[in-house]
């Protein structure tokens, strides 16, 4: 009887502990358990969202007008400047992999953000100093500028996969209420990112063009300084996740161990596979993962054979010969995530059109609206504005309304949300194609097909395609960020976020590849092709419909993968 009372008392104390402390393994800066009501949640995220907004304002303040600086101030030829900007932007999308590996393996998200933000700030200071040097550009000024520019690429890339995931870490994954709030965090993080992008595109570009590059680069430097200050102010109330060691090594261990045991028979009872006893995990700072029946071959890495026990002989077992179930499930998760990740590449290829072919389409439309001349590039503002309008509507109105019907805490599942965005991206391209069909029809009616002139059709007809593009991002882009965070192994969240960012870069490469193919195959035999220099002679509408068709096929593949996807579960 006394034993039962003691057990009940311990259970009650444990339950009280779970209420007071986080249940997802988060700790304070000293590595100690933390009280839920004193740390994390929105009280910590306000500082992180402020950091994200200021940092993105700084980054886009450099990016949006960079080619102008290279041609006007450093006197580079157009083709050289364009190549240098594309190379730098490509670097910005690959450096997140470095930042993610450092964060997941060694430093953790907080110290990785601190280290790479410092490099980021130093790079911006160097850009500002180089812009303030009077007179003609010298070789030393150019070298200093590019050194600073690539420090910015290293710093910006290093913190990209860490800031959003660190913000999401402030919500206890084991608490349904906080988990629901975390979904809202991803919406508002995207909102703040786009606020920064919008302000930099409107204000900073104007300052750079009219008040000089010293001030134009100095303001982003100031905002990056504010971002760093905002980030460190919240240190005392942040929740931290411990780094789990190199994810690359753990993946290799599972592959090597399973290959070594390729002749070993798997047990019928999955509970016989190797796992550490109790709640502790082999991976530091990570929760255990439940076994799944997919990719059974990899389970061989967790089969215990006599040689494992002999080699261990009371010492820790060799992870290159025997892995835990959680290690194996980490690799299985990555394999399951891969096809979902791959389908987003086509989505980003659609997004690239707003920065390329939509602008070229706008250049041959009537840009005069009353007494104003609208630059084709300015219409991309509708992309951002539609996102800024729809994020609050989605979070505060649509989610509660859909929740009543589905019973899910966020209305839609993450995969359903991404699928809706993929469908909207098809409508984006169909809308662009319809505008182009009408434009070409007017060109034929007015006998302007062979004239390289604007067609008397208002550029404002492009607004729907930009708005649809922004709306699709509310669903797919934000849904993707939330999905990869939720489904990634605890100790690989930055790495999965980095690969999520990489799909954007690959979307750009896919778009470029499609343009090359279309240009080559449609312009043979003396034909002008679909995308000639004079778009009035071409068929840009067919190119848009081609991407719409590719997106439709991609959506079917996504639905097939989503229906078969197994969500992760922790022990």
Image (spheres, grey):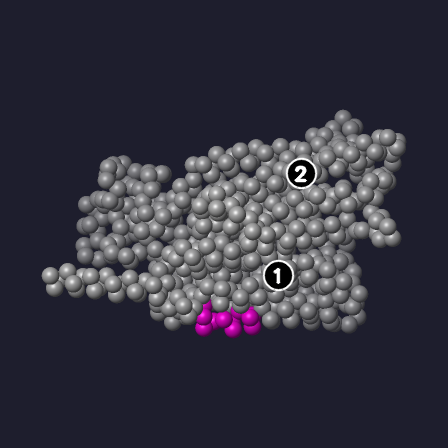
Is any atom of residue 219 visible in this view? Answer: yes
Query: Residue 438's spot in the image, x, y percent?
Result: 78, 34
Front-lying residue, 134 or 93: 93
- Label 2 Cα crowd, 10 Å radius (few <14 / some 14-19 / many 20+): many
Q: Residue at x 61, y 51 (%)?
A: 390
Residue topped by disc 1: 56
Estimate the spatial distance between the alpha carbons at disc 1 and disc 2, rounded to whole Å. Answer: 28 Å
On the picture, is 332 further left or further right than 416? left
Q: Residue at x 59, y 34 (%)?
A: 552
Q: Which residue is drawn at 25% across and 56% down?
A: 278
The question of residue 162 being in magenta is answered with no
- Vertical order, 48 against 249 (above or below): below
> Residue furthest toward the top?
525
Residue 138 falls in image quadrant: bottom right
Query: Residue 242's spot in the image, x, y percent?
Result: 39, 63
Residue topped by disc 2: 429
Is any atom of residue 500 visible in this view? Answer: no
**Magenta-colored span:** 228-238
Q: Which residue is drawn at 34% across and 55% down?
A: 287
Query: Residue 52's spot in the image, x, y percent?
Result: 57, 62
Residue 124, labelled with which disc?
none
Magenta stretch prevailing secondary structure: helix
On the picture, is 407 further left or further right than 389? left
């Amino acid at each position: 009887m006394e034993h039962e009372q003691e057990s009940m008392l311990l259970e009650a104390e444990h339950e009280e502990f779970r209420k007071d402390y986080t249940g997802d393994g988060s700790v304070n800066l000293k590595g100690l358990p933390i009280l839920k009501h004193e740390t994390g949640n929105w009280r910590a995220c306000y500082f992180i969202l402020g950091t994200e907004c200021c940092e993105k304002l700084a980054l886009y303040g450099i990016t949006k007008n960079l080619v102008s600086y290279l041609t006007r101030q450093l006197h580079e030829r157009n083709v050289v400047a364009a190549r240098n900007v594309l190379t730098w932007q490509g670097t910005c999308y690959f450096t997140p992999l470095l930042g993610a590996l450092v964060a997941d393996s060694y430093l953790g998200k907080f110290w990785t953000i601190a280290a790479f933000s410092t490099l980021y700030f130093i790079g911006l200071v160097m850009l500002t100093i180089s812009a303030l040097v009077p007179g003609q550009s010298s070789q030393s000024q150019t070298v200093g500028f590019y050194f600073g520019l690539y420090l910015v690429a290293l710093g910006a890339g290093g913190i990209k996969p860490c800031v959003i995931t660190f913000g999401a870490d402030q919500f206890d994954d084991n608490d349904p209420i906080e988990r629901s709030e975390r979904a809202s965090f991803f919406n508002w993080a995207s909102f703040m990112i786009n606020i920064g992008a919008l302000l930099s595109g409107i204000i900073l570009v104007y300052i750079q063009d009219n008040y000089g590059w010293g001030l134009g680069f100095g303001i982003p430097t100031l905002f990056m300084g504010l971002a760093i200050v905002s980030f460190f102010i919240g240190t005392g109330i942040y929740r931290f996740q411990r780094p789990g060691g190199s994810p690359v090594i753990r993946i290799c261990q599972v592959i090597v161990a399973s290959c070594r045991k390729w002749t070993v028979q798997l047990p019928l009872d999955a509970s016989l596979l190797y796992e550490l006893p109790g709640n502790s995990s082999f991976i530091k700072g990570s929760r255990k993962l439940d076994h799944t029946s997919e990719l059974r071959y990899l389970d061989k890495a967790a089969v215990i054979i006599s040689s494992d026990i002999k080699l261990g002989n009371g010492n820790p077992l060799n992870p290159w010969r025997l892995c835990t179930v959680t290690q194996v499930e980490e690799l299985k998760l990555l394999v399951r995530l891969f096809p979902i990740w791959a389908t987003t590449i086509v989505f980003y290829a659609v997004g690239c059109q707003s920065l390329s072919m939509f602008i070229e389409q706008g250049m041959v439309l009537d840009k005069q609206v009353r007494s104003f001349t609208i630059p084709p590039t300015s219409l991309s503002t509708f992309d951002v504005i539609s996102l800024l309008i729809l994020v609050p509507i989605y979070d505060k109105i649509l989610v509660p309304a859909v929740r009543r019907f589905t019973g899910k805490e966020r209305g839609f599942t993450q995969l359903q949300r991404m699928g809706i965005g993929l469908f909207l991206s098809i409508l984006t391209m169909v809308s662009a194609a319809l505008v182009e069909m009408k434009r070409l029809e007017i060109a034929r009616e007015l006998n302007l097909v062979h004239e390289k002139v604007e067609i008397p059709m208002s550029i404002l007809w492009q607004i729907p395609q930009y708005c649809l593009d922004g709306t699709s991002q509310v669903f797919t882009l934000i849904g993707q960020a939330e999905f990869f965070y939720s489904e990634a192994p605890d100790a690989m969240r930055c790495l999965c976020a980095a690969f999520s960012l990489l799909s954007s870069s690959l979307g750009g490469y896919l778009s470029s590849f499609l343009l090359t193919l279309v240009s080559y195959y449609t312009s043979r035999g003396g034909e002008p092709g679909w995308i000639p220099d004079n778009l009035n002679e071409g068929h840009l509408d067919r190119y848009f419909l081609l991407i719409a068709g590719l997106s439709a096929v991609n959506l079917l593949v996504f639905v097939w993968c989503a229906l078969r996807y197994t969500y992760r579960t922790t022990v």
